Image: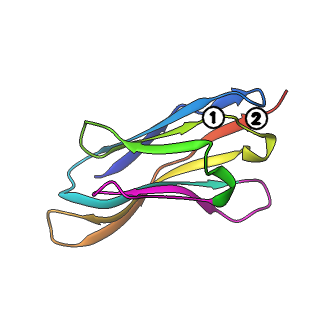
Amino acid sequence: QVQLVESGGGLVQPGGSLRLSCAVSGSIFSINAMGWYRQAPGKQRELVAAITSGGSTNYADSVKGRFTISRGNAKNTVYLQMNSLKPEDTAVYYCNADQALGYDGAWYDYWGQGTRVTVSS
């Protein structure tokens, strides 16, 4: 069974930094793209940042220049470095593995359980 395990959330003051991590456990042949989404109270889930297997990245306008997504040396890990955090960044952050190819030849879309980030003084 494939699972995405996130870590690194917490409480931070405005202007501070956090680093989120996501590791894929279980058997998966390949993943075309991984990303981070967030959902604030009363709002829809939105894309924060994504990275392809080739290293191409995409960011929401609201986080450009402050957040950096990267893939780790270990297979199927992804990080989100968040700097200059603002109260409006407060949300539950979800890791996503998009277009994941299983050994059975089927394509899957996996989500983590979410990690809470609170930016407050």
Q: Quadrant of the C terminus?
A: top right
Asked if residue 14 lies left or right of residue 33, the reply is right
Q: Kindly identify the amino acid type of the residue bearing the numbered disc 1.
A: Asn
Q: Secondary structure at mark 1?
A: loop
Check disc 1 and report the residue beneath it.
83
> Do the residues under discs 1 and 2 have CB atoms within 8 angstroms?
no
Q: For label 2, count other residues whose C-alpha is less than 10 Å away and answer few (under 14), some (14-19) or many (20+).
A: many
Asked if residue 82 lies left or right of residue 109, the reply is right
- Residue 9 drawn in magenta: no
**What range of the chain is rendered magenta?**
40-60
Q: Quadrant of residue 34?
A: bottom left
Q: Nearer the viewer, mark 1 or mark 2?
A: 1
- Residue at x-position 78% and y-position 47%: 88
121 is higher (above) or lower (below) than 86: above
15 is higher (above) or lower (below) than 63: above
Horizontal and vertical percent position of residue 32 = 30, 63
- Residue at x-position 32% and y-position 38%: 72
